[in-house]
Each structure stands twice: as C-alpha cells, then as structure tokens.
Amino acid sequence: MRLTLKIWRQKNSETKGKIETYNIDDISPDMSFLEMLDVLNAKLINEDQEPVSFDHDCREGICGSCSLFINGRAHGPDRRITTCQLHMRKFKDGDTIYIEPFRAKAFPVIKDLVVDRSAFDRIQHAGGYISINTSGNTQDANATPVNKEDADAAFDAATCIGCGACVATCKNSSAMLFVGAKVSQYSLLPQGQTEASRRVVNMVNQMDLEGFGNCSNTGACEVECPKGISLDNIARMNRELVKASFK
C-alpha cells in the first residue's frame, strides 16, 4: 500500500503546531496502525529527520495509551478498538490519512501526537479508591454477597481503560463517561458504600477543576469508546451526586 500521511507535528506545549505531509509505501494491510507509524519513523531516522512522537505501551488494547485521532475519529475508522488494534486493511491503497492528537483543554499536547492525560489520574486520586481497614483477620471476599446483576454492571464499568476517547470525541470535551464509569464500579458494590458520597463529590469537583466540559447527552462518547462503556454510568453518577447533596 502507498499512503499519504498528514500528521500533526508540535515541538512542545509552548510552540505552535502544524500538519506535515509524509509519503510512505510498502505498507502491508496486515500491519497494525502503530506498526505503520514504526515504519514511518524508521524511514525518518534513516533520512536524519525527527521521528514522530506517539504514545504506546501494551499494543493489546489494554492500556489505552495509543490514543490518536485518525481521519476525524478517536482510534480511527472501526468500532470497539484502540489505535493499536486498528489494522491497515481498514484503509485503501493511495489513501490520505490525517493523524492528530486527542484535543481538549485538559489534555495539553506534550509533543506531536502525545498528550498529557494526567488529569484522569488526579480525578481517580480524588476518590477512586476504597479505604477499608484490613488489619487483623481480613474477611473473605465471598463473605459479602453481591447481586449478580450489580456485579456484572460494576465489572462492565471497570473495563474503562481511561484512554480519553470519550473526551476527544465530545464536542464539549466532557469527561463524564470516564468519571461515571469510575464512580459506578464502586457505587454498585457494597464495599464502595462507606465513601460513596465523598467519592462522587470529590471526583466531580476534580473533573470540573481540570477544565473538562459538560455533558450534552449527544452519545458520541459511548459510540467511540473502545470498551463500549454505557451512558447509563453517567446517569448513575448524576443520581449518586444528587443523593450525596442530601447528606
């Protein structure tokens, strides 16, 4: 395959960026999108040019760090995948592909396609934990029965990998799907009830402090989420927030 790549290049967060054009060939349809970028970088290095910076780690759809905006879609033209799971057979020979970083005020660009998503970490630190004293004889986990429907819903929420596709896709750069998932995975379980009120208030307050926008119920976040996190989690977070306001 021969491709024309239009890639966002930006030296750092303080400088202006721009789209630069690269031509590349001998790309196999069986390559992953990140493998294609590896080939491009090898070519650039051989030509004494600066390689393109992009995030990646597991390359198995687990870590969520490979967050790219490809032809106007988070993680590219496929459903329920991360960028590392996108294969070049989704494109045609001769295609022009636009590759940009996830764009949001709360996700400042570090370099090229790499953005700072530590805002998500700070939201989780604000309340995404259970501080139960486990000193002495710890109870067996199975001693606290959990309704299967609740356990399944909590597990589904916990599959969120924090990639930020929901933020990048939302016209308001809202993080409510992410925060809703993190609130839900605890609020559905008895172990998470002790701190439920503090958790939702602290996490929502931190979300607002980070500069994320508000949810307008467009639903694009659920569509582009690689794990298919449901909008139900946003509704559950809002209910938890209302309940906390009465305590």
Image (cartoon, rainbow, N blue to C red):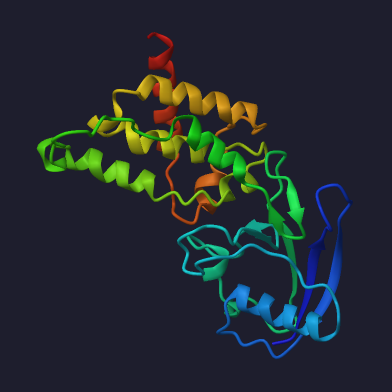
Residue lying at 85% horizontally and 72% vertically, measured from the top left = 21
Q: Compare residues 64 and 49 and report the one nearer the observer.
A: 49
Could you tell me which quadrant the N terminus lies in? Answer: bottom right
Q: Residue furthest bottom?
A: 26
Q: Residue at x 55, y 69 (%)?
A: 84
- Name the side, left or right, on which 176 lies relative to 139: right
Closer to the camera in the image, 39 or 135 = 135
Residue at position x 10%, y 37% from top? 143
Does 50 sit left or right of 80 as displayed? right
When the figure is inspected, residue 126 is found, relative to residue 37, above or below; the finding is above
The image position of residue 57, as x and y in percent, is 54, 65
Is 41 positioned to the left or the right of 79 in the image?
A: right
**88 vs 129, nearest the viewer:** 129
**Residue 182 image point, x, y percent:** 43, 38
Name the residue: 61% across, 36% down: 174
Toward the top, the furthest residue is 246
Location of residue 76 by image quarter: bottom right
Q: How many numbered tags mark residues here?
A: 0
Q: Position of residue 105 (x, y in %)?
A: 72, 39
Q: Is residue 192 above or below residue 15?
A: above
Drawn side of residue 239 relative to residue 81, left or right = left
Quarter of the figure with residue 104: top right
Image quadrant containing the C terminus: top left
- 32 in relation to 138, above or below: below
Residue farthest to the left?
A: 143
